[in-house]
Amino acid sequence: MIFRSPYEDVAIPEVSLPEFVLADAHGRGDKAALIDGPTGRTVTYAGLSGGVRALAAGLAQRGFGKGDAFAIHSPNIPEYALAFHGIAAAGGIITTMNPLYTKDELAFQLEHSKARYLLTIPQFLETSQAAAEASGVEEVFVFGEADGVTPFASLLAPGEEPPVVNFSPRVDLVVLPYSSGTTGFPKGVMLTHHNLVSNVVQAGVVQGVDEWDVVIGVLPFFHIYGMTVIMNLAIHRGATIVTMPRFDLQQFLELIQDHKVTRAYVVPPIALALAKHPMVADYDLSSLTMMMSGAAPLGASLSKECAERVGCTVLQGYGLTETSPVTHVNPETAEGNRPGSIGFPIPNTECKVVDPASGKDLGPGETGEVWIRGPQVMKGYLENDVATRATVDGEGWLHSGDLGYVDDDGYFFLVDRLKELIKYKGFQVPPAELEAVLVTHPAVTDAAVIPSPDEEAGEVPKAFVVLSEEVPLEDIQAFVAERVAPHKKIRLIEQVDEIPKSASGKILRRVLVEKERAGA
């Protein structure tokens, strides 16, 4: 059974990503496009538009052109958007890199993506240069200045005409982020101009970003969520983005208050902090009209708690790197938003729920793997046909690896990752469901659940919890037991100082699993 978006399909322009996103930028003149939160340094829309043209011209003069790869290894700063779209306007492919990567992780991505150039910041230079030397990168550039490295500003050729690039939007790649996908090893996700233009158009139908909005740019632009939903959608709509190089709760709250931020795109750990941390009460967050959480499941109870504390609507959306990323979003209206749900499929998007064992299509209320089809689905994984065929089938359906169901009203709900389910005496136990219950306990500020081997049951749920006050761990187990079926009870529990998470906010359960195995 195919579930379609309740929204009408929309037309997708056949243009390059920078042409689409920056179509009205020059005409917005001195309006702030991006503001550096810590320093207040501002890039105007006219400055962004002119800088993109100058960078494209400068790159062309260096012989960099269509199909060449350029790596960006940087936190969120205003110039990130200028570099991103300048490279794209020259016909290049941007491979975006996690600022927390080690030298070896960077070197792998640089070599695999065949990046010619690397752009970084002075603070990352030692690691970046070592990785560049190990992978054959031609030259390293730096935002600002650093000894022995070419400044980014020298790449710009103001007043020169940018190259005329003959784009084929459905064929030509524009970004190459790396994702583990449904398996553990990083893979280059080939996203075309058409993929990203499509997703900005699709997301824009359900996300009412407008030119009077101020958006907090806390989610990393290297990650597809921050790249599409914050950087590209907000710039396309003429909003102002206040960037943060990394998440710091106090600075996050100060920037919302001082810049009167209207829209916040977050991940569950930030929602958790907003719901529970006492510091939140010291700041005026009344300018916020909407907060959307993505990248990992957000439980209904936490969503409601956060909304009540902050005083604005808290929505949940869903997507994958392989879908550019957005596939589902809740409506922004209070009556349309359904806490705990990822919402409806966005325009031009079809979904199925499929039994992983039999391959049978399932109906409302039945749990299976969520499959997605639409113009935002990736071209494939770079140089990995086997993984591509395992993820996108011959009919264009992307197999998400996520278990979920759709209710009678068409709202989708996620249960957990297909490969992370705990098998307790033959019963399936979703870790995310237990984590959502755990964080509703007054003393639990964060939690993660993993499978722990058990001779009798096969696996039992084990919880790791971060506590704000000392309470007997048995009390927390009892708290969960009162709220779940008997087979989902927490059988083991351990207090820890922090829960390991990725830069996008996903719980790194494999780190806890490895720790558990090492301890055993």
Image (cartoon, rainbow, N blue to C red):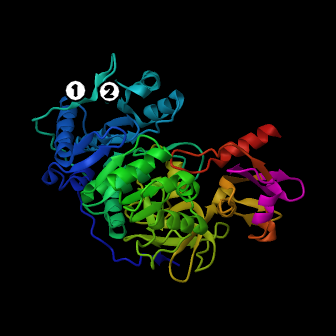
Residue 227 seen: no
In the picture, measured across the screen, residue 498 lies left or right of residue 64, that is right
In the picture, measured across the screen, residue 178 lies left or right of residue 34, that is right
What residue appears at the point 66 percent right and 70 percent down from the top-left corner? 358
Q: Which mark is residue 192?
A: none
State whether residue 452 is above or below residue 297: above
- The quadrant of the image that shows the C terminus is top right
Whether label 2 touches label 1, CB < 8 Å: yes
Residue 389 at x, y percent in the picture: 52, 55
Residue pointed to by mark 2: 141
Tag 1: amino acid:
Ser
What residue appears at the point 24 percent right and 52 percent down from the top-left corner? 16
> Which residue is most to the front?
282
The quadrant in which residue 194 appears is: bottom left
Q: Which residues are magenta?
A: 452-480
The quadrant in which residue 443 appears is: bottom right
Q: CA distance from mark 2 to mark 1?
A: 9 Å
State whether residue 447 is above or below residue 327: above
Q: 231 or 416, which lies in front?
A: 231
Residue 102 seen: yes
Residue pointed to by mark 1: 154
Tell me the SS state at disc 1.
helix
What residue appears at the point 52 percent right and 63 percent down from the top-left corner? 309
Residue 275 at x, y percent in the picture: 55, 59
The quadrant in which residue 354 appears is: bottom right
Q: 409 or 112, which lies in front?
A: 409
